Image (cartoon, coloured by chain):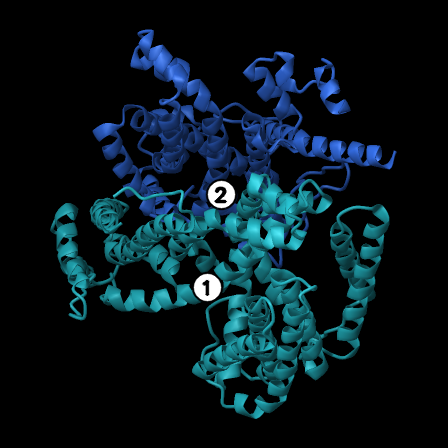
Chain colours: A cyan, B blue
Amino acid sequence: MVTYIVRRLVTAVLILLAASFLVYLLTAASGDPLQQYRQSSLPNKEQLIQQRIQLLNLNTPAPLRYFDWLGGAAGCLIPFAAECDLGKSIQGIEVTTLLARAMGQTIQLVTAATILAIIIGIALGIITALRQYSGLDYGVTFMAFLFFSLPIFWVAVLLKEYGAIGFNNFLNQPNIGLSAMGIIGLVAGFICYLVPKSGVKRKLIAAAIGFVAAVALCWYLDISGWFLTPGFGAIGVALMGVAAAYLVTVLTAGLRNRKALYSALITVGLGMIAYFAIQPLLDLATILMIIILGVGAVLVGVAVGYLMGGFDRRQSMNAAGLTAFLMGFVILLDRYMQEWPEYFNNSRIGGRPIATIGSSTPNLEGNFWIAGLDIFTHLLLPTIALMLISLASYSRYSRASMLEIMNQDYIRTARAKGLTERTVVMRHAFRNALIPLATLVAFDIGALIGGAIITEAVFAFSGMGQLFVDALNAVDPNPVMGVFLITGILAMTFNLVADLIYSVLDPRVRVKA
Amino acid sequence: MSTSAENENPDTATPEARGLSQGQLVRKRFFGHTAAVISMFVFAGIVILAFTSVGYAGIPGWYQWNYIETPPIQGRGEPTWELPFDFGQHPFGQDSVGRDMFAMTMRGAQLSLIVMFIIGALGGILGVIIGGVSGYFRGWVEAVLMRLTDTVIIIPLIILAAVLGTISQTMTGRGTIANAIFGGSDGVVLLGLFVGVIIWTGLARLVRGEFLSLREREFVDAARIAGASDRRIIFKHILPNAVGVIIVNTTLVMASAILLETALSFLGMGVQAPDVSLGSLISDNQQAFTTRPWLFWWPGLFIIAICLSINFIGDGLRDAFDPRQKKFRAKKAKDTRASSSAEAKA
């Protein structure tokens, strides 16, 4: 195993060297870095050209300049030496500084989108696999193909128009019209129509319930002025907690396991006590405090499950722990919503909260919650755009993987033993269906940092993509190399991780030493 | 059971039992895939519309404007198309200087399609050659070619494509022969060639895997013992068996190629003004969304239509070549379940 990893690492370094050489030469050949000055009519034109030649060392041919760059970059390999020198950009700023800033932005942008895409995509894939060739399956398949085929820049511009400008206009006059309510109701009804497995009557009943529920919800949101003063309130939090408890129990233990259900419900009760108890504490919230509270909540949940004891303790612990996490999330969300009016009426926001460009409102003052809401309003649209597109591939892959597993002999054996469908799906099929996805996720994370280039360009996010595009337009190899180095190293690392994960998860796969 | 008796009846036998050739089976399965067949017609329609309407390479089309002319703006330049068949002067509207949007969209679609075909063809050929050679000959050839593949694959596609797209822009206008052949769009051809040179990596890996497993099969051993040359084994025995993987993945490469090209043109690193691509049309008109939304909708819809139809064709081809997740199996399972439950009731 160790030999294998060492060998892979050595090849990786060599490949990285070759690829970086290639990128450097191509970038240097992509244009004329002096273009900007050649056509200018400034009196000190000659001097400026000389300055730039000096700065970028243009009198040396590109292949030699690469080794110059490589010498500086090699300093990055020595840990803690702070000798990392990736050269300077065309404006004379250190590339390492630029990269550090851009990477923070990009990671902020892609994290939420990736996590959401993975969770929703896999859930959709599993559900459609279990309902193969149903209306739901065809619907989701069509949507997945559509999302595959969407040009992200087009979606992004649409989102800016309707998601930001349109929604902001709506917020200034938050009345859902009757016709809009009807349309939302019909869409909800149609989705509910697809959910039941069979039987036109059951499908129609589901559709009717969906329609009524959606219209009632819209009507309530409308008359209570929810959009201006959002929040769940204590009752909402409690209802969502109970719903989460049931859902988690169904998925992890099955409703027949009463101990698991009760421990989840007890956790919700404790969560409600905490909801009232910690509100004053949350006024002083910091990110660290939220993390500690979250971990504490999960520990309490696990403890409740442990104390419930019983025949299969772990199931109760899982159910209660997961419920506690969801409960904490709902409380957090509720708290953010309570702060919404203050954010909304802030003079820097001026009643138009959903932003179309940038990653934060400049000069916005406020506490932890206001800052969080600001990040949320800026990330919302790019996250949706990025998510839609990767969601499609996750749902397709997990569907295919699940279908293959469900046709295996051991699934039939599990059913023949008399296990419930839930146990068969969640314990036998789902876990094994995730194995090929682990590789896919690893690959994707490696490719993500470079993949947000277009989204960043549309939403004017000053991340890695923007850095790359600007540098390429200015024929400035150093930042391009910086971006490539980060993405390349990430891609290599995650390829290796993917292979190792695969051999750990699936013992049939052995790595060759 | 009644189902096994039915299977021996030639009318209801599975297609495999009817003595059809492999090609016939594939064709039959493909034409049984409704979405793929519809997509094929949509795609053919778009290709015909794009190339006949505004003409190509000096051959005039049937449409009255071209993408450069600036006829006087009518009204605010709104689309004059009234459903269903009253097209008017400018069915897709006009932009701020009066250029006809339909002509521009068609020209953009032409260029995007050309780039897509070049990328698909070049990427496919390179992928098959590199993957096939390394899978069949193994040894140091495989080591070198696969390390080359690794080198190209770790550079994010969009980064490499953007750099090459910029290079293709600086080289445009020099290739006069290409200019003559491709109707003044040699920059586009260069872009296609450059992206095709880097997009083969995924296909090469797949083809290599396919060749690696096929070369160990008995029929290849048999051919070798019978004295067949490497060339004969590759072209007559292995390649026909790998053709499914190749066709399906080339199709999918083409679908991603059109998104890549439009994205590059959107960023200003692909097709250059005065020529138009579907991507650059969107890029030029995104600011005008509130005042002239029609400039923005049509190119986007064409990209989606082209890409979606190719994806569905690819899906149909995959089902046709690789029928492991067959449709009729699910239906048969349902039938058997239904009949057995009926028997149980009886």
A221 left or right of B176? Answer: right
Q: Is residue A99 left or right of residue A60?
A: right
Chain that bears disc 1: A
Foreground label between 1 and 2? 1
Which residue is nearer to you in this view: B136 or B294?
A: B136
The structure residue drawn at horizontal position 27% and vertical position 24%, both measured from the top left corner, is: B137
Quadrant location of the C terminus of chain A in the rendered image:
top left
Q: Nearer the viewer, residue A145 or B101?
A: A145
State the residue position of label 1.
Answer: A111
Residue A482, by quadrant, is: bottom left
Mark identifier at residue B259? 2
Q: State the image coordinates of residue A463 (x, y, percent, origin top left).
A: 39, 63
Q: Say what amino acid the circle numbered 1 marks.
A: Thr
- Of B265 and A308, the residue lying toward us: A308
Residue B247 vertical position relative to residue A374 in the rendered view, above or below: above
Q: Residue pushed farthest bottom?
A: A280
Task: Assess disc 2: are there few (<14), some (14-19) or many (≥20) residues with their C-alpha within 10 Å of its C-alpha.
Answer: many
Q: Residue at x 67, y 53 (%)?
A: A420
Residue B264 in the image: x percent, y percent?
43, 46
- Looking at the rendered structure, which numbered label has been put on residue B299? none
Chain letter of disc 2?
Answer: B
Q: Position of residue B136 (x, y in %)?
A: 31, 24
Mark 1 secondary-structure assignment: helix
Q: Residue B170's x, y, as percent?
A: 31, 42
What element does badge 2 sit on? helix
